[in-house]
Amino acid sequence: DIQLTQSPSFLSASVGDRVTITCRASQGISNHLAWFQQEPGKAPNLLIYAASTLQSGVPSRFSGSGSGTEFTLTISSLRPEDFATYYCQHLNSYPITFGQGTRLEIK
Amino acid sequence: QVRLVESGGGVVQPGRSLRLSCVASGFTFSSYVMHWVRQAPGKGLEWVAFISYDGGIKYHADSVKGRFTVSRDNSKTTLFLQMNSLRAEDTAMYYCAKGGGRPLGDAFDIWGQGTMVSVSS
């Protein structure tokens, strides 16, 4: 199975900050990676697919990059509504797996 | 609008069974693969099962293989998860999710609100 490791697991930042979350895969997965945002008590929401393509309706302050085994999600300027938990997910093969999550909190 | 609505969760004793349903609307259900994903309280996301457009191909996570079975009824635009021999570690919020197809790299683009399953004696 392909393991995904996110770093950091916890991130404290301020409104207006630029933040980057990293997701490393245990083996190469090309660009078969997605990013999700999950607010407490809600279902996950797709932000990025195919490693770098912004899902329709997602603000342009979100961006993704990477290929192979290392990927990043960047939020260029944090807004209050961005404080949530973020997950990466690979779609390269079955079983599909998720990273352990990165909890982004207000400093 | 595109919508997924899960139901069937509840409190059940270890060893018993439960059947979850997910009703889809707003899109051509029979044209998309579907998934189940679960999330234990305070924990991360775990993929549970996949089913192809016509139900001919299914995959299940090792943690549920042999106990859970995914199925679908395209005529009723409904996805199911039959859960047998339930264990305490199956306690979780269960989400159904729609596969976005090749244009989205098969990413899970639509999720339901979830249905909670609690396994306890």
Image (cartoon, coloured by chain):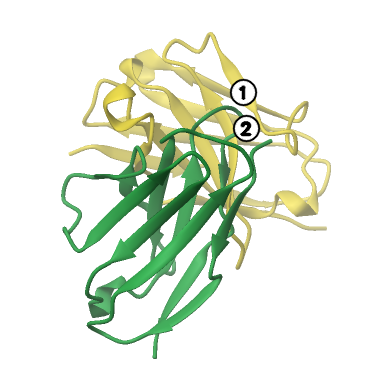
Residue B117 visible in the picture: no
Report whether B11 appears left or right of B20: right
Q: Position of residue B14 (x, y in %)?
A: 82, 48
When the figure is inspected, residue B75 is found, relative to residue A74, above or below; the finding is above
Label 2 with label 1: CB-CB less than 8 Å: yes
Report whether B5 appears left or right of A5: left
Answer few, some or many: residues within 10 Å of disc 2's Cα (few below 14, many 20 plus, some between 14 and 19).
some
What hue does chain A carry in this figure? green
Answer few, some or many: residues within 10 Å of disc 1's Cα (few below 14, many 20 plus, some between 14 and 19).
some
When the figure is inspected, residue B54 is found, relative to residue B108, above or below; the finding is above
Q: Which residue is mark 1?
A: B59
State how far apart marks 2 and 1 are (Cα).
8 Å
Residue visible at 40% across and 56% down in the picture: A72
In-front residue for pair A81/A51: A51
Secondary structure beneath dot 2 equals loop
Q: Position of residue B45 (x, y in %)?
A: 56, 52
What hue does chain B carry in this figure? yellow
Question: What's the amino acid at mark 2?
Answer: Pro
Residue visible at 48% across and 20% down in the picture: B72
When the figure is inspected, residue B72 is found, relative to residue A53, above or below; the finding is above
In-front residue for pair B115/B60: B60
Identify the chain of the residue marked 2, using the numbered disc in the image: A
Identify the chain of the residue marked 1, using the numbered disc in the image: B
Report whether B84 appears left or right of A55: right
Q: Which residue is mark 2?
A: A95
Quadrant for residue B76, please give it.
top left
Residue A34 visible in the picture: yes
Secondary structure beneath dot 1 equals strand
Give the total of numbered labels: 2
Question: What's the amino acid at mark 1?
Answer: Tyr
Q: Position of residue B120 (x, y in %)?
A: 78, 58
Report whether B84 appears left or right of B116: right
